[in-house]
Image: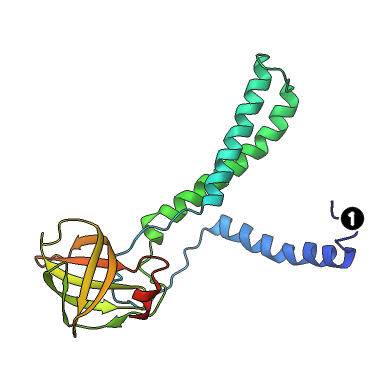
Amino acid sequence: MFRGHLHWPTAFALRILRVPIGLSCLWWLITRRELQFQVTPKSGAAERLPGRVPNVLLALLGLMGAVVLYALLGLTDRVAWHVTPAAAAASGVWLILAGIVLVLAIRRIQSPDFSTSRRNAHRVPLSVAVSVNGIDGELTDISVGGAAARFPHGALSGLGAVVLVLPGQVMIKMKIVRVSPDGRGDDNASLRVTAGDWATYRA
């Protein structure tokens, strides 16, 4: 498939460069050292959300399941095609290995230890009076694509589209994506601009 596209100097260089990387990975597997690092706390760091699993990983997992089902049906002689046990065993080892890697990747993405509180823009700490659908609250911080505000506990009835009123009667449409107690008797609400709402981004 790579005839005429992959040159031997490039292939040779890639093989050489993989050696120290492989040795480093092997050393980590043997020693199991835990790397220590610290991240500068940011506003909203205590409210972290699990990562979203890319659709391509879910599609690959489903495709692997379909291939396994195909092989199992071929071994039962109940379908038009036939798969030999040797062929099923040879490919099954690689399928199981790839499946384990995919499952571990999905679990790592969804793990609370790797949750994120980052937004797509810089957060600006700001404490001003605001209201959401007529309910008075206090703005905590704001960015181009979102905002965080504090409200009395139980004041917000649910999630969904709302109108955030900023000082100067600036009204922008946003969506409440999360409401969580702050431990001091109030609720923290995370608001986000709907994708493609350029008028709100401009405001």
Q: Residue at x 63, y 63 (%)?
A: 24
Q: Residues within 10 Å of mark 1 (few under 14, many from 20)?
A: few
Q: Residue at x 60, y 39 (%)?
A: 63
- Please, what is the three-letter code of the amino acid marked with disc 1? Arg
19 on left or right of 49: right
Q: Point out residue 49 in the picture as x, y percentages from the top left corner.
A: 34, 60
Residue closest to the eye, 147 or 163: 163
41 on left or right of 4: left
Q: Residue at x 69, y 29 (%)?
A: 89
Image quarter of residue 185: bottom left
Mark 1 lies on residue: 3
102 on left or right of 171: right
Q: Say if 65 sits above or below 48 in the image.
A: above
Q: Say if 91 sits above or below 141 in the image.
A: above
Residue 92 in view: yes
Q: Point out residue 197 in the picture as x, y percentages from the top left corner.
A: 38, 69
59 on left or right of 87: left
Q: Residue at x 45, y 49 (%)?
A: 107
Residue closest to the eye, 144 or 197: 197
Which residue appears farthest toward the top when viewing the image?
A: 78
Q: Say if 196 sits above or below 140 in the image.
A: above
Residue closest to the eye, 105 or 186: 186
Q: Identify the image quadrant of the C terminus.
A: bottom left
Q: Point out residue 202 in the picture as x, y percentages from the top left corner.
A: 37, 80
